[in-house]
Image (cartoon, helix red, strand yellow):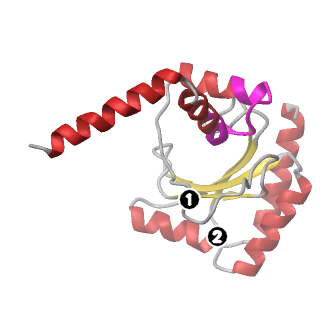
Amino acid sequence: MEREAAAQTESKITDEIAKRFPDVPLKRVAVLQYGDDPVVEPGEVVVRIVVDAPEGKELRRQAIEAFHADREAFEKFRDDVAASLPDARVLEILTENEGRDRGPHMRLLLKAQKGEGRPFAPGELTPVMARLGPADLETLDTLITAGIAPNRAEAVRWVLARIRQRPAYGQLRERAQAIEELKAQF
């Protein structure tokens, strides 16, 4: 998406928020693409809505909750954003006070990405949060760009699966189990 088109989309979303949610103290709307913010993955578009909020975590949380107090109107807005921006995958609502930390926020999927929704039983996957440096992000993003994985989570799972296939991993796992058995004897 060209920057001019993104700016027009931001303006339209801003107008829609003003019409549908007049009590929300909107600070700005940003349509982010890969390279605009580290949280945006290759091929992903994120719609970020920043709500102006007073100091204090509780007041900032209330500012976000006010945005979606009318659940039906909020769901319709979310569906309309998804329909008008086919490449948008995430709707993010956050607070910002005088440029400081993001504070409380909501991050909602607008639609599943191709390749997501692999058949795992409920509770079979464990969420893991990792802080990655630029080189690690570049590695994951290269796997996405090459079409090996649709997103960063799948790229990490792909890399771990490759590690498990190596004979050295089997040996390492056996030795780790032997160490655990020795520790249990103490």
Local secondary structure at mark 1: loop
Question: Depth check: 167 or 111 in front?
Answer: 167
Q: Does the magenta stretch include residue 173?
A: no
Q: How crowded is mark 1: few (under 14 residues within 10 Å), some or many (20 or more)?
A: few
**Looking at the image, is mark 2 or mark 1 nearer the viewer?**
1
Q: Position of residue 133 (x, y in %)?
A: 49, 25
Q: In which quarter of the image is the C terminus?
A: top left
> Does residue 55 appear to the left or right of 92 in the view shown?
left
Local secondary structure at mark 2: helix
Q: How far apart in space, not on screen, are marks 2 and 1 (Cα)?
A: 33 Å
Residue beneath the point at 57% across and 55% down: 94
Residue stretch rendered in magenta on the structure = 142-155
Residue beneath the point at 60% across and 39% down: 157
Question: Depth check: 97 or 111 in front?
Answer: 111
Q: What residue type is labelled 1?
A: Glu
Residue beneath the point at 51% across and 54% down: 126
> Does residue 1 appear to the left or right of 92 in the view shown?
right
Q: Mark 1 points at which residue?
A: 124
Question: Of callouts 2 and 1, which one flags the residue occurring earlier in the amino acid sequence?
Answer: 2
Q: Position of residue 4 (x, y in %)?
A: 88, 34
* Quarter of the image where one finds residue 185: top left
Which residue in the rendered view is the most extreme toward the top?
Answer: 135
Vertical comparison of 85 with 165: above or below = below
Question: Depth check: 22 or 91 in front?
Answer: 91
Q: Where is residue 77 in the image (x, y as percent from the top left)?
A: 80, 68
* Quarter of the image where one finds residue 166: top right
Q: Name the residue under label 2.
A: 67
